[in-house]
Structure formats: C-alpha cells, structure tokens
C-alpha cells in the first residue's frame, strides 16, 4: 500500500505542480525558433511552431495523467458497482450482468474506445466517455468473484439475518475486502488509461489543440520524425516512464499483499 501512496503523491505532484516549473507558455508560438534542437534556452528543443517542448510536456502531464486518473476512477466505480450487483443479486441478475461483461470483453478495449470516440466526435469528454465505457469490465469480474466468496461468510450471513440492507452490507462488509484487490487492478488500469489517452490523442480523437497532451504532441511531431526525431522521443519517453512507474508500483503492491496474506 505504501508504494501506491507514493505513486499517487508523485503523480499528483507532477500533474499538479509540474506546470509551475515550465519555463515558457506551452501554447506560445515562436516561429523564428521553430524546430530548434536542445539548447540552454530550450532544454528539449522546440516543435514546428516554435513552442518549447519541455513546457508542453510538463503541462501535458496535467492532461495525460489527470485524465487517466479520472478515467480509471470512473471505471473503478462502475465496475465495482456492477460486480457487486451480480454477486449480491445472484440468479438471473448475475447471469445477465456477467454475460454483458463478457460481451464487452470480447472487443479489444482500445479498438472499441477509438470507435466510440470517433462516433461521439472526439474531444476531452468524448475521450473520457470512450475509455470509461470500455474499461470497467475487469473491476466487475474481480468484485463479483470476491463478492461470491464473501456471501457464505458467517459475518455476512449474520448481517443479513439482522436485517441490514444490501447497500449497508456492501458498504461495511464487501468493500473493505474488495479494496486491496481492486487497488492492484486499478494500478494496471491507470497505466492502460495513460496509453489509451495517448493513443486517442495521437489519432486526433483526444485533447484538442492548442492544449498540450502527450499523444497529441506525438501526432504533431509525426511529420518531422525524419528531420527532428527528438520531437517524438520526448513525449514518447514521458508515456513510457509513467506507465513503467505505475506498473512497477502495482507489482510491488501485489507482492506486498501476497506476503501479508501468506503471513510470516
């Protein structure tokens, strides 16, 4: 859990105060300095419009990491609610819910997100909707599996006999048991959300110009990949490092929970 807390602090810090360290306005056009190589004035160089790449990457973190956090959180809430509904409802409710989940899982998430974003016109809200709609299924399966195992526990049966509502049982008995496993799933889905946002941005369906976002920065730099490849390398590295850090934190959390469960 400590690794996830540290991850959250680092991500919030980068997304929140990173732009404060940007040396220039990320949207300011400076044609005389277009496609400048890295220098003391522009540490990572400039793009085709003369905008400072370092400033755009720092400001882009607010979009790429912030939107990924929002998307993964929305997916977590939706998936957990659906999984608990299936586990608590049982019978036909469970069958319909899980068959719906399996139907969503049958389509590649990124392809489905691209189709939805394209149909809804692109843009920030379209991106959030597309990725949230295609990202809740794994949470649902985990929540349903753990929920089914908890239904036969003595304290859950006692709570039912005491007249507690299904919502209260879910709040006080199910969610505390679900939280560790769902947190591990969330770290992986957070990383996938960053990749999804960058992919949609690269295809032109994400955050729209002039707002800097890592995927849209890759799109802008694509035309100059032969003459100035560093334009694509810097935002690409930002995506890779973020995803790698999140996945490593998720692995550390999973190992810590496994050790805690197995005991000394």
Image (tube, rainbow, N blue to C red):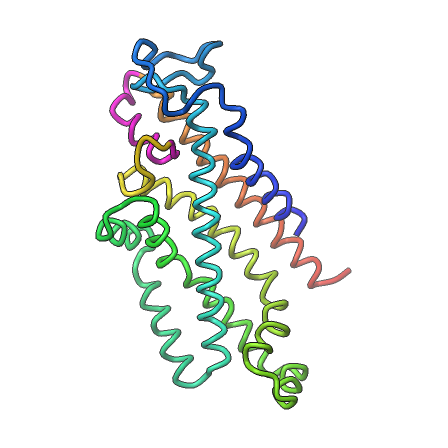
Measured from the top left, where is residue 89 in percent x and y? 47, 82
Residue 229 versus residue 17 in the image, above or below: above
Residue 80 versus residue 129 in the image, above or below: below
User: In which quadrant of the rendered image does the C terminus lie?
Assistant: bottom right
Total tally of numbered discs in the picture: 0
Nearest the viewer among 226 and 140 is 140
Outermost residue, right side: 264
Q: Residue at x 28, y 55 (%)?
A: 112
Q: Quadrant of residue 230?
A: top left
Tell me which segment is drawn in magenta: 212-227
**239 in the magenta segment:** no
Measured from the top left, where is residue 224 in percent x and y? 27, 21
Outermost residue, bottom side: 161
Q: Residue at x 67, y 84 (%)?
A: 154
Left/right of residue 4 with respect to residue 72 in the rendered view: right
Q: Residue at x 37, y 68 (%)?
A: 101
Q: Residue at x 51, y 55 (%)?
A: 186
Measured from the top left, where is residue 71 in percent x and y? 43, 52
Q: Main secondary structure of the magenta part?
A: helix
Measured from the top left, where is residue 231 in percent x and y? 36, 22
**219 in the magenta segment:** yes
Residue 37 versus residue 54 in the image, above or below: above
């Amino acid at each position: 859990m400590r690794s996830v807390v540290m991850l959250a602090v680092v991500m919030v810090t980068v997304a929140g105060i990173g732009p404060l360290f940007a040396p220039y306005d990320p949207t300011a056009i400076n044609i005389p300095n277009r496609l400048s190589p890295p220098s003391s004035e522009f540490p990572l160089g400039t793009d085709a419009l003369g905008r400072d790449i370092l400033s755009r990457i720092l400001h882009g973190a607010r979009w790429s990491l912030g939107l990924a956090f929002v998307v993964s959180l929305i997916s977590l809430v939706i998936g957990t609610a659906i999984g608990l509904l299936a586990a608590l409802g049982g019978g036909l409710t469970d069958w319909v819910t899980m068959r719906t989940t399996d139907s969503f899982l049958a389509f590649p998430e990124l392809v489905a997100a691209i189709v939805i974003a394209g149909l809804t016109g692109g843009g920030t809200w379209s991106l959030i909707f597309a990725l949230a709609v295609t990202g809740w299924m794994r949470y649902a399966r985990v929540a349903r599996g753990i929920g089914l195992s908890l239904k036969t526990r003595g304290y859950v049966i006692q709570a039912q006999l005491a007249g507690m509502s299904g919502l209260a049982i879910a709040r006080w008995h199910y969610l505390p048991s679900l939280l560790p496993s769902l947190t591990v799933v969330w770290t992986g889905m957070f990383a996938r959300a960053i990749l999804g946002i960058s992919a949609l941005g690269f295809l032109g369906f994400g955050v729209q110009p002039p707002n800097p976002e890592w995927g849209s920065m890759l799109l802008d730099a694509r035309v100059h990949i032969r003459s100035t490849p560093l334009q694509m390398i810097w935002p690409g590295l930002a995506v890779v490092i973020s995803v790698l850090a999140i996945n490593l934190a998720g692995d550390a959390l999973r190992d810590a929970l496994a050790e805690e469960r197995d005991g000394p």
